[in-house]
Each structure stands twice: as structure tokens, then as C-alpha cells.
Image (cartoon, grey):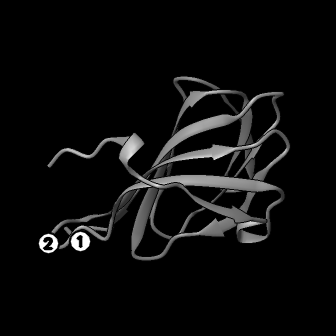
Amino acid sequence: MIIKVDSVIPEVAENVREGQGTVSAHKLLDMFPGSAIKSVGLVRLEPGASVGSHSHHGEEDFYYCLSGQGVVVDNGAEHPFNPGTLQITRDGETQAIRNTGETELVFLGALVATIEP
């Protein structure tokens, strides 16, 4: 399967999970049948925008920064989020993210079902 980001119309949302500002996401894959992969997307936060704190249950999430500057909140602890940074939220943990820069914060996000051993 090949999916190109420029073939996907972005979804735009305001105040995601009680965050601030505009977030757009190119959902490259959404609910892939027969796979632990639930979704994969290219996400863009405008300067000052954020995704509010939220937890995951029965699934895990990751954010991988491609460009821009921000802060990711991993289980209540703030960390710089810049190109090359990977943040992983395991089952039952919490995360939030905000753009602290003057340009878009662009990251790859993926959600996968938790696999029982």
C-alpha cells in the first residue's frame, strides 16, 4: 500500500482536546482493518496552537517531530519537542503538545492497538 500526503485532504479542527488554536491533520491511514495500526497522520499546529492533555486506553500513540519547535507533555513532565524528537505514550499514560515557535510545528503521529503478550 502506498499513500501520498498530497492526495489526502487535511482535516482542520479548533481547540483539539481542549487545547488552543488550529490543528490540521492529513490522515494517511485511518482504522486499517486486520492490523494493530489504527491511524497514521501528518499533523500541523499553527504557532501558539496546542492539543490538550489526554490519555490512551487499549492503544499507544507516538509523535515524531519533523519541523518546528514545541513542547510535549509526557505524563505531566514537559520536554522540548524539535526535529528528531520521538515521544511515545503507552497504554494508560497521558500526553499533550503545543507549538512554542513562530512557524508551524509538523509531526508524524501514529496510533496502534495495545498488543497483549
Give the x, y percent position of residue 113.
32, 68
Q: Between disc 2 and disc 1, whose residue precedes?
A: 2
Query: What residue is pinned by disc 1?
Result: 116
The residue shown at (40%, 69%) is: 59
Spot occupied by residue 51 in the image (x, y as percentages of width and height): 71, 58
Q: Examine the rendered structure and indicate whether residue 39 appears above or below residue 34.
A: above
The secondary element bearing badge 1 is classed as: loop
Q: Residue at x 52, y 23 (%)?
A: 84
Q: Residues within 10 Å of mark 1 (few under 14, many from 20)?
A: few
Marks 2,1: beta carbons within 8 A: no
> What residue type is disc 2 on?
Gly
Seen at 47% across and 76% down, the residue is 57
Relative to the observer, which residue lies in front, 65 or 57? 65
Q: Is residue 17 above or below residue 62?
A: below
Q: Position of residue 49 (x, y in %)?
A: 80, 49
The quadrant in which the C terminus is found is bottom left
How many marks the image carries: the answer is 2
Residue count near mark 2 (Cα–Cα under 10 Å), binned few <14, some 14–19, many ≥20: few
Q: Is residue 15 left or right of residue 91?
A: right
Q: Give the residue type at disc 1.
A: Glu
Gap in Å between the C-alphas at discs 2 and 1? 16 Å
| Element at label 2 | loop
Instruction: Give the residue at mark 2.
Output: 34
What residue appears at the point 45 percent right and 67 percent down from the top-left corner?
A: 91
